[in-house]
Structure formats: C-alpha cells, structure tokens
Amino acid sequence: MIPAPDFDLALTLHSGQAFHWEADGPGFRGALGDVAVRLEQRGDLLAVEPESASALVAHYLALDHRMAEIHAAFPPGDAVLAEAARACHGLRLLRQPFWECLATFITSSMKQVAHIRAISLELRRRYGADLGGGLHAYPSPARLAALSEEDLRSCALGYRARNLLGTARLLAAGRFDPAGLAGLTREAAEKALRTLPGVGPKVANCVLLFACGHLDAFPIDVWIERSLREFYFPRRRKLTAEFLRRFAARHFGPQGGYAQQYLFHYARIVRRRDPRRISEPSPGPSA
DNA sequence: CTCCAGGTTCCGG
DNA sequence: CCGGAACATGGA
C-alpha cells in the first residue's frame, strides 16, 4: 500500500495516455515497462502487487506531482479550465517509458482510442516479452526493427506500419538516441523528435508530455482544437496550428500540459453526455 | 452507406 | 507559407 492522495487510478488509466491497462475486478493489471503489476485503489491508498514495484508505480503514476501548486498556476479567470479541472480531479500525467509512448502515439494517428488500444495489445501479444498472466511488454525497437512492413500491417497498422518500422530502425541502429533528449529544452527536444518518421507536432508533444516530463508540452489534436475553438475563439474565422500553439503557451503557462489533458478529457466526457455540446469545426450559425 | 478517428507528409499555388 | 489530398482500418 502506498499513499495516493488526490488521485484517481481509473480516471488516469483511461485518460488516453496509455492504452494497455486491463480492468481486473476493482483494480487494473498491466505491464509497467517489463514488470507485470496489479493496481487497486482503496480510498487514498494504492495497493501494488508486487509490493517491490511500489517505487516504480509511484514514479509512473506521478504521485509526487504537487497538484495544488499546478492548479494555482492556472489562469485565474478561466472558468472553462476550472470546470474541466474539477471534472478531472485525480487525473495525473504519467511518466511512461519513452519508447512505448513514442511507438503507441506513432500508431495513434487518425485512430480512435479503442483502435490504438487494439493495435498496442496486438503488438505486445505477438512480439513483446511474455510477462506471465497474459501480460506482455511493449516490443523493443530492435524487435520491431527486425520485422517487415507486412508483419506490422497485419496488426491493422495500415499506413502507420512504415512510420513505426522506420522509427524503430533508427533507434535500433543508434541513429537516434533518446537519452540525448534529456538535457534539451522542450523546443529543442520537439525538433529532434520530429526528425523521426511519423512524428509531427502532435505526436512529439504527446511524447514530451507523457514520457519526458515536459509539463509545458501542449499536444493539439482534433478534440483540443474543437475545445479551444468553441470555448476561447467561437467567432474567429480561421485558427492556424501556430496561432493555437502560441495562445496555449501564453494562456495556460508552464503547466499547460495539465490544462491540455483536462480539456481533452473533459471534451470527451461532455461529448458522451451530449454529442452536440462539442461542435464540429464548421463555424457559424447559418444552419 | 457515409462519416470520422488523440496526424503526418507531400504537393501545387 | 498555406490549403488540400492521400494514407488504411474499423466502429458508430
């Protein structure tokens, strides 16, 4: 048992950061890197099996993030963000292993969350180390690099197969060193990541936020774009990616990553409740 | 059947 | 620099 105040395990594991956790009764099972663990929340405590993985789990779940300070740094007058943050109480930005985060988000483009999950689990099952109990580690760059594009396409990867394979081969060959990102600024790290095939601004920022600890990273996907458009710029004709990026950095500040994750998840919650609440990108009351 | 999904890349103006 | 289109697959 480890202390986990202001934390919501189910919310965190279902917030679209990692895609491989499986419900197991009131708890969850999954691979944390190459360690199989079971997690179960009991109030402000977290039961971890095996107990020897407790420190690993606490780090992965970012239980040390000081949420009060993070929320205090949000723009004071932003009622939308305050509402989203309230709805997402207990959500943490994970510290995921670099490679599986990068790889899963390369496979995420133009895919629903359920599809990303299916692809991730299939890659693990076929090519990942068997951890017992039906759990598998994410296959290493070297393992994937040895496969053919056809192997990957048969995991329902579609056109993403080429990108995943290309990136896996660059890492396996030592032509791209993840450790080299550690000392870089967010901007420099993003630039380096974007040299990889299948990694554009969105995927790069996901990796920076969910794996590299850059809490100012702000991935802009279709959901965030809709939210920003609807809540912050309902009357503006066109919103370029660059404009939104600058706005987010200025408005949400150094903890923008948390704001982003709250807005992302909130938009999806609201949409489930009422599909018309978050509108399509088409502007204007002409309908 | 049509539309869309946590985008990236390439191409023509 | 900008808008558009191609890219695979499956669920709603």
Image: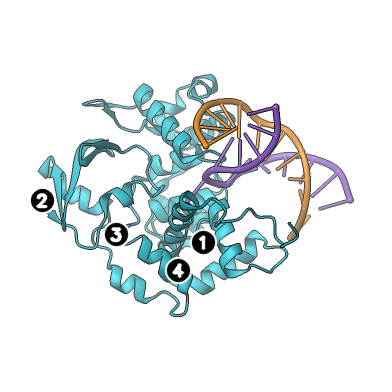
Chain colours: A cyan, B purple, C orange
Write down the residue under mark 3. A90
What amino acid type is highlighted by mark number 3? Gly
Write down the residue under mark 2. A1
Tell me which chain the residue with mark 2 is part of. A
Write down the residue under mark 1. A187
What amino acid type is highlighted by mark number 2? Met
What's the distance in space between the residues labelled 4 and 3, CA to CA? Answer: 15 Å
Q: Say whether mark 4 and mark 1 are on the same chain.
A: yes
Q: Residue at x 36, y 28 (%)?
A: A124
Tell me which chain the residue with mark 3 is part of. A
Tell me which chain the residue with mark 4 is part of. A
Disc on the earlier residue, 4 or 2: 2
Left-right relation of B10 to A64: right
Write down the residue under mark 4. A81
Q: Say whether mark 3 and mark 1 are on the same chain.
A: yes
Mark 3 or mark 2, which is nearer to you? 3
